[in-house]
Amino acid sequence: MKMRSDYNCPLEMTHDIIRGKWKPVILWELSKGECSLSALKKAIGGMSQKMLVQHLNELLEWRVIGKTVSDGYPLKSNYFLTDRGEKIFEAVSIMQSVGIEMMLEDNREEFLKEKGLL
Amino acid sequence: MKMRSDYNCPLEMTHDIIRGKWKPVILWELSKGECSLSALKKAIGGMSQKMLVQHLNELLEWRVIGKTVSDGYPLKSNYFLTDRGEKIFEAVSIMQSVGIEMMLEDNREEFLKEKGLL
DNA sequence: CAGCATCCGATCTGATACTG
DNA sequence: CAGTATCAGATCGGATGCTG
């Protein structure tokens, strides 16, 4: 989701931040604690590295996450949620619980139990 | 956002429901009360009718909104949030308040006042 | 009024290969 | 390990005109 400079509606702004396919999952992972690129990659299945890096950069632009990198080898990056990111995570968090409720409606409690979400 | 049949993660499911460009605004409008197609069209600026109808249909598939139509002429449609829709609206609602907080950080309180959001 | 069909450009996403 | 480059395919979104 490319960053527009100005928004006429707060809702749109937040929406654009989260719209990318993998954004919520990335934020979800980072909410557990700071994390390197490779750790994120491992944690999130099915996502190409290109998308991961691209989404991370967009989140950086939005100042939703922050980043530090070590100088030496092997390189080591650290991504983490900013205060703003924690705010946005509230929305992500609700998305998760709403999703769980919908799955319950659809009689998928077994699935949720497997995942330890119930 | 095309509907996938199965999700491995509740978060993804909710995300797909809201991802479409105009979905949050549509839900926002409907949260104020049920509404006809033309009323939605008027309320939401900049959106083509095609996208409006398409997004409404997707929301219907997800059972996030419901719909009734009158028989006679002129035709009259009514779209409204379902219980599930009200749940999802909680997420939308937080997206709005997070957006407001971000705009405050960016010193846009004048703008927010104009819109009556402050 | 409500909604569908079509055409087309913009954007997003993914696979693969390569650099510091 | 962290990240870039490139290319192709999928999807999304918008404009316009038509139907019941």
Image (spheres, coloured by chain):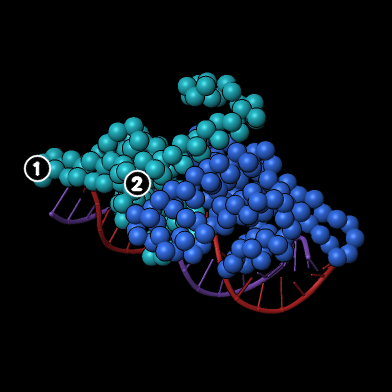
Chain colours: A blue, B cyan, C red, D purple
Question: Between A45 and B33, which is closer to the camera in this rendering?
Answer: A45
Tell me, yes or no, if residue A105 can be seen here. yes
Identify the residue position indicated by label 1 in the image.
B72
Q: Residue at x 11, y 41 (%)?
A: B73
Residue B90 lies, with reference to residue A34, above or below; the image says: above
Q: Is residue B39 left or right of residue B1?
A: left
Nearer the camera: disc 2 or disc 1? 2
The residue depicted at 88 percent of the width and 64 percent of the height is A73
Report x, y in % for residue B22: 42, 45
Asked which quadrant contains residue D18, the reply is bottom left
Separation of residues labelled 2 and 1 (CA atoms)? 30 Å
Q: Position of residue A27 (x, y in %)?
A: 61, 51
D15 or A3, which is in the foreground?
A3
The answer to which image quadrant residue B31 occupies is: top left
The type of residue carrying mark 1 is: Gly
- Which mark identifies residue B5? none
Count of marks placed on residues: 2
Q: Is residue B78 left or right of residue B31?
A: left
Local SS, label 1 = loop
Q: Mark 2 is on which residue type? A: Arg
Name the chain letter of the residue that bears numbered label 1. B
Mark before the other along the chain sequence, 2 or 1: 1
Q: Which of the chains bears the disc numbered 2?
A: B
- For the residues beneath circles 2 and 1, the answer to whether they share a chain is yes
* Residue that badge 2 annotates: B84
Near mark 2 (Cα within 10 A), the count class, few <14, some 14-19 or many ≥20, is some
Q: Which residue does the image show at 31% across and 56% down from the upper left? A: B61
Q: Secondary structure at mark 2?
A: helix
For the question of whether residue B37 can be seen, the reply is no
Residue drawn where x is 65% and y is 57% of the image: A54
Q: Position of residue B67 (x, y in %)?
A: 23, 46
